Amino acid sequence: MIKHLIVMSSAYSIGKRIALDYCDEDILQMDVIQKDIDYIYKKCGKDAPISTHFIHTEKKGWDEVAATDKFFKDAKLISTKEEFVDLILKDSILKGIDIAKYILTKVPCTHLKLQKLVYMCYADYICKSGKKLFDDTIYAYRLGPVVDTVYQKYKKSGYSCLEVEDDKELYDEEKKKMPIRSRILSSTDGLDKIISIDKTLEKYSAFEAITLVGLTHREKSPWSISGAAKEMYQKIDDSIIIKYHKFEEV
């Protein structure tokens, strides 16, 4: 009989649950396992989304674990604690496209409207918390602030409505099991981010795209202060957003 202690988490960047498998025929080395768990928490933070599970199998091997309990069937076995940590840390940082996908689960949008809602979510959050909602560059385009990863994803969509069903990446079979809301919750300060995003959408989601453009084009808005009226594609710095976002709020 083989004893297993399995440490698990979720890696949204690869669309799978991940696992470290500690196994032995006699006695599990709990002091070694605890040191590895302490290492994970030290690197990823005390709120790292990990769980531990005990299981017995007749034979060694991850395939045997999955055969014994289907709960582990779709989990990816990770060979080292360092790789396990790297995958968790990768999920702690959001990109603008993560916020865009979440918005599309709640609000049908054109690319233009989506850009403005993602920007408003970012601006509201950084002004309240002093922290970045996501790690992305925001530029001043002709029709207002544009988030780089969102632009790269949807730039060919034109003026058509972006329904969430059209996003094949989000509806990939593996990623169905890990909805984008959970992706955001797994990031640093995830609950605060979800609360802030939802509050922003309550304020702005009913507006038409052109109305949102008008808000971002107001005098003293971050878009106008960045010099976009004279030269397009200027980067809008966080310091400008924090100081001038109040002029584009409703």
Image (tube, grey):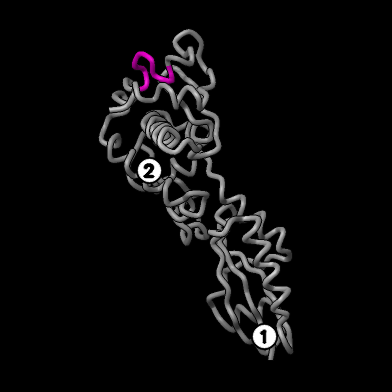
Residue 206 spot, x, y in % from top left: 25, 35
* Image height of 143 relative to 105, above or below: above
* Image height of 96 relative to 220, above or below: below
Residue 235 spot, x, y in % from top left: 54, 21
Residue at image position (42%, 35%) is 118
What residue would you read off at disc 1? Answer: 3
Residue most extreme to the left? 206
Residue at image position (71%, 76%) is 31
- Please give left or right for residue 182 compared with residue 72 in the image: left
Q: Give the quarter of the image for residue 49.
A: bottom right
Q: Is residue 167 magenta?
A: no
* Image height of 186 relative to 140, above or below: below
Observer-nearest residue: 103 or 92? 92
The CA distance from mark 2 to mark 1 is 44 Å
Residue at image position (40%, 36%) is 128
What residue would you read off at disc 2? Answer: 196
Q: Is residue 221 magenta?
A: yes
Residue 247 spot, x, y in % from top left: 34, 21
Q: Secondary structure at mark 1?
A: strand
Observer-nearest residue: 249 or 101? 249
- At label 1, counting other C-alpha atoms closer than 10 Å, the crowd grade (few under 14, some 14-19, many 20 or more) is some
- Please give left or right for residue 124 compared with residue 13 in the image: left
- Please give left or right for residue 172 compared with residue 247 in the image: right
Amino acid under disc 1: Lys
Amino acid under disc 2: Ser
**Residue range (magenta):** 216-223
Whether residue 32 is visible, yes or no, is yes
Q: Earlier in the sequence, mark 2 or mark 1?
A: 1
